[in-house]
């Protein structure tokens, strides 16, 4: 997700800086939602959901295509979320469960599954890109423009993080997730249906990521190839937090999203490479902390 | 050994395929030859991924590393470098990139390393996009000079399409076979030992980080070879090497090959490449998904099916039945007592002195207990205590302190002895990833024996512990009892002066318990100082000269270490 800021400025005015910050906030919100999805799947299975971005973009393109065809945007969004949940749960059933606890094999299989999914969506939806209708209201904030859709993205991310924190730490569903990840055999001895828990975790991950992709498609029209980037940056945000607190996932996303917007503003196309390097560092550092 | 037979079979298969494919230019059109060269180089990537998997570093960056090498070689050749020299530079850069990734992910688990290498691959692709003037952007770097060799006198030996395929095939086959042989020999066993269990590898004097980086350098060099050959064979370096689609194929091929090693992975990679490039299009498949993506999906499905439920594709790595050694175990109890091989400690005898040692589960935590031990050389000392008292933690801490040296609370007796302390852990046995034979040979070599002596010692221990029938079986496939026998042989082949045993009798049947007790008694008789943590006090009393009771400080409410010396 590249921030759509003006390039080529010789200096950064206060207004431009504010605009960058607002764009960075929205971008971070998208990565945070995907990161939360990765985290909930990881919490239930210890598997890195490397196919999540592709499932999310598939869902968003389905929703956007429906909206283009005249289906009301809220209905199209709900359909997108359901498609995201179904695809992600299907990936768990077909690619993660057969791996029988081999997390590296499951991760590689999810990458392969994402590859196939990307090709399928490219074949089924033939437009170059699909945009999702968004809230069009804008407000002037200092020297920048805050779009309602961006504010919604950031707010949804924070609410998602808070909600996920409550679910993981304060509910029976969260406890079941943690117990399942700790060891399926032990969890089953106390009556936890670990298969259902894992499937539910992946479905929830699909909903969160599809929500992120729908919001992203409202900012920049979605293409099938974007799924990999969104998924991986979200994963790095979750890893930067050591797969710990959901609010830390948001901070990780802020680091990656902020870097992307700022680096793209300064370097243009080179910003993406810088973003990946920062994401790489966040992943390595955060994972060590988790270990 | 069966491991060798499995590895040899795949190496032979690579040689046969290379020979058959060498005839391909005779009946392939010029248009087909490019795809053949690409499929062959994908085989090299599968083999490179197999080397990385062997050392416990499943990498999605192999194709990206090939891309780095290809771009470097292509760019250098376009700037006037001789093609062989440019290729060598590209291969070197591939090895270096692989090592850098290994360092960056040194502390990550397998899944973390998968993610890290995928992000690194995409970073490479983004860098190519960012430098269109230098690297050609999405259209790629071209025209890259074809394979050619400068000759004396200023002439150049240039290869046509058929010659290019021949040369590509020859170089890839040579690289794959070299890596396959390396993995079958001692370096490969060391890498698998490191990948299987770094802690146990430390016992054998292996350096996990160094071994990992060496293996990754070899993997990167092989990937680089594939990358430079693809670029010079097709005449263009494209960013497709940095795509997710390209990244996942080699890793899946390596996982499918499992212990078949680089040769099997190369064949799986090349076959998948051929399926996507030629077979599916020839069958009329137009997608979606595209033929290459479908081929990758098929490979993923086959890999999952092959590995599902803990089953390996036995044909790739044949071995004895998993619990084949148990029958021998049952019979062993009725046979005459085994004659134990020599166990003289490396560097001479040494006792163990532990004074005021805090048993700490992790850095910064409050001590669970405090331990005092004075064990003379060649004695057996028991260590008892309730679950959670800290017995395992104490043994791990003592082993670590003795390995590091310099801890005032733990030392060999006499002080300064150049002795070796080895831990017999509570779980597992042998090195996961290695066969029983490889484990014993590796441990024997780590006990400072020559090659011939190591073979002799490993054979002697296999005979003494009835492991002959399981010699070619991967350790992780063994039943618990057999695996514990392998572990007993492994630690004693290391020739420790101090052996720290964590519940060595847990989960063993009567015959194996007797055999283990007898072996430990014999070890002590040959000068090994043995500390045994065990719940079975009756068995402990049979071999231990004294037993110390470990009590938790927080539960017993005091700072006084519990004395509890219980004479045998």
Image (cartoon, rainbow, N blue to C red):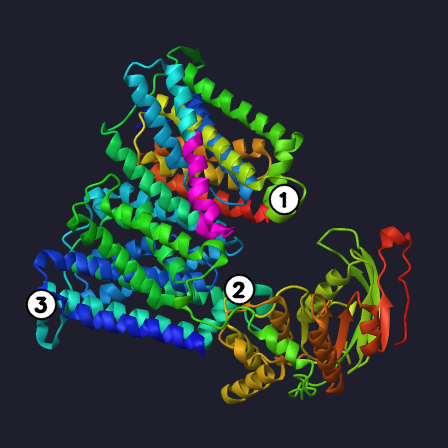
Q: Are marks 2 and 3 in contact (CB under 8 Å)?
A: no
Residue A54 versus residue A143 in the image, above or below: below
**Circle 2 marks a residue in which chain?**
B
Q: Residues within 10 Å of mark 1 (few under 14, many from 20)?
A: some
Cα gap from disc 2 to disc 1, whole angstroms: 28 Å
Q: Name the residue under label 1.
A: A188
Was residue B412 drawn as part of the magenta stretch in this picture? Answer: no
User: Could you say where residue B427 lies in the image, as x and y percent from the top left?
Assistant: 65, 63
Disc 3 versus disc 1: nearer the observer: 1
Q: In which quarter of the image is residue B370?
A: bottom right
Query: Which portion, as a residue range, is magenta?
Result: A85-106
Residue B88 versus residue B248 in the image, above or below: below
Residue B26, label in figure: 3
Residue A49 as seen in the image, left or right of residue B560: left
Q: Which residue is drawn at 68% across and 65% down?
A: B426
Q: Is residue B220 visible?
A: no
Residue A24 versus residue B351 in the image, above or below: above
Was residue A95 drawn as part of the magenta stretch in this picture? Answer: yes
Q: Residues within 10 Å of mark 3 (few under 14, many from 20)?
A: few
Same subunit: marks 3 and 1: no
Q: Mark 2 points at which residue?
A: B196
Disc 2 versus disc 3: nearer the observer: 3
């Amino acid at each position: 997700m590249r921030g759509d800021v003006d390039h080529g400025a010789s200096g950064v005015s206060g207004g431009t800086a504010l605009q960058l910050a607002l764009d960075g906030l929205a971008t971070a919100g998208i990565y945070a939602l995907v990161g939360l999805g990765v985290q909930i799947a990881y919490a239930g299975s210890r598997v890195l959901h490397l196919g999540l971005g592709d499932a999310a973009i598939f869902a968003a393109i389905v929703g956007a295509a429906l909206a283009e065809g005249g289906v009301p945007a809220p209905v199209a969004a709900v359909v997108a979320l359901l498609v995201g949940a179904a695809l992600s749960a299907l990936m768990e059933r077909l690619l993660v469960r057969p791996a029988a606890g081999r997390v590296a094999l499951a991760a590689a299989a999810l990458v392969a599954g994402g590859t196939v999914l990307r090709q399928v969506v490219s074949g089924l939806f033939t437009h170059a890109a699909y945009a999702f209708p968004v809230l069009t209201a804008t407000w002037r904030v200092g020297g920048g423009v805050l779009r309602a859709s961006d504010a919604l993205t950031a707010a949804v991310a924070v609410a998602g993080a808070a909600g996920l924190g409550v679910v993981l730490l304060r509910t029976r569903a969260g406890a079941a997730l943690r117990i399942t990840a700790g060891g399926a055999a032990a969890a089953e001895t106390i009556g936890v249906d670990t298969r259902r828990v894992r499937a539910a975790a992946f479905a929830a991950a699909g909903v969160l990521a599809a929500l992120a992709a729908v919001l992203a498609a409202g900012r920049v029209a979605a293409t099938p190839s974007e799924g990999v980037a969104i998924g991986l940056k979200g994963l790095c945000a979750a890893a930067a937090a050591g797969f710990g607190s959901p609010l830390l996932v948001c901070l990780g996303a802020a680091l990656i999203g902020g870097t992307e917007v700022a680096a793209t503003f300064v370097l243009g196309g080179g910003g993406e490479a810088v973003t990946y390097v920062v994401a790489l560092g966040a992943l390595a550092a955060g994972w060590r902390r988790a270990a | 050994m069966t491991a060798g037979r499995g590895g040899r079979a795949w190496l032979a298969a690579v040689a046969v395929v290379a020979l058959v494919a060498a005839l391909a230019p005779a009946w392939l059109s010029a248009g087909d030859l490019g795809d053949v060269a690409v499929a062959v180089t994908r085989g090299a990537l599968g083999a490179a991924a197999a080397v990385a998997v062997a050392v416990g570093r499943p990498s999605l960056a192999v194709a990206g590393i090939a891309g780095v090498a290809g771009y470097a070689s292509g760019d250098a050749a376009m700037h006037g470098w001789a093609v062989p020299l440019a290729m060598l530079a590209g291969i070197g850069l591939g090895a270096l990139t692989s090592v850098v990734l290994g360092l960056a992910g040194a502390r990550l688990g397998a899944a973390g390393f998968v993610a890290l290498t995928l992000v690194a691959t995409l970073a490479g692709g983004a860098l190519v996009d960012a430098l269109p003037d230098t690297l050609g952007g999405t259209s790629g770097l071209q025209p890259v000079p074809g394979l050619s060799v400068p000759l004396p006198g200023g002439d150049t030996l240039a290869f046509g399409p058929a010659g290019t395929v021949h040369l590509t095939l020859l170089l890839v086959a040579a690289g794959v076979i070299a890596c396959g042989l390396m993995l079958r020999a001692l370096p490969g066993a060391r890498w698998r030992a490191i990948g299987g269990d770094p802690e146990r590898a430390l016992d054998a004097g292996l350096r996990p980080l160094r071994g990992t980086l060496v293996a990754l350098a070899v993997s990167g060099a092989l990937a680089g070879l594939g990358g430079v050959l693809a670029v010079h064979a097709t005449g263009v370096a494209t960013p497709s090497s940095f795509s997710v689609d390209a990244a996942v194929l080699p890793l899946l091929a390596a996982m499918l090959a499992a212990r078949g090693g680089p040769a099997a992975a190369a064949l799986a990679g090349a076959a998948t490449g051929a399926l996507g490039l030629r077979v599916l299009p020839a069958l009329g498949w137009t997608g979606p998904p595209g033929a290459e993506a479908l081929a990758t999906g098929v490979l993923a499905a086959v890999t999952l099916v092959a590995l599902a439920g803990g089953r390996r594709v036995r044909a790739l790595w044949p071995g004895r039945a998993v619990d084949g050694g148990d029958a021998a175990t049952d019979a062993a109890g009725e046979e005459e007592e085994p004659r134990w091989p020599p166990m003289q400690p490396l560097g001479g005898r040494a006792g163990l002195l532990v004074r005021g040692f805090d048993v700490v589960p992790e850095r910064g935590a409050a001590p669970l207990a405090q331990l005092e031990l004075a064990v003379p050389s060649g004695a057996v000392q028991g260590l008892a205590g309730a679950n959670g008292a800290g017995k395992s933690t104490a043994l791990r801490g003592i082993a670590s302190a003795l390995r590091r040296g310099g801890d005032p609370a733990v030392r060999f007796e006499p002080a300064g002895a150049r002795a070796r302390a080895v831990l017999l852990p509570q779980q597992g046995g042998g090195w996961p990833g290695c066969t029983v034979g490889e484990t014993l040979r590796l441990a024997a070599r780590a006990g400072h024996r020559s090659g011939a002596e190591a073979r002799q010692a490993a054979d002697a221990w296999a005979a003494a512990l009835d492991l002959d029938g399981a010699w070619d079986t991967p350790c992780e496939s063994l039943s618990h009892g057999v695996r514990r026998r392998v572990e007993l042989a492994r630690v004693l082949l290391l020739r420790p002066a101090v052996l720290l045993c964590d519940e060595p009798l847990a989960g063993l049947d009567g015959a194996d318990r007797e055999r283990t007790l007898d072996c430990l008694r014999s070890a002590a008789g040959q000068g090994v100082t043995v500390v045994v943590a065990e719940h079975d006090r009756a068995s402990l009393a049979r071999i231990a000269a004294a037993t110390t009771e470990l009590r938790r400080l927080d539960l017993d409410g005091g700072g006084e270490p519990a004395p509890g010396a219980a004479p045998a």
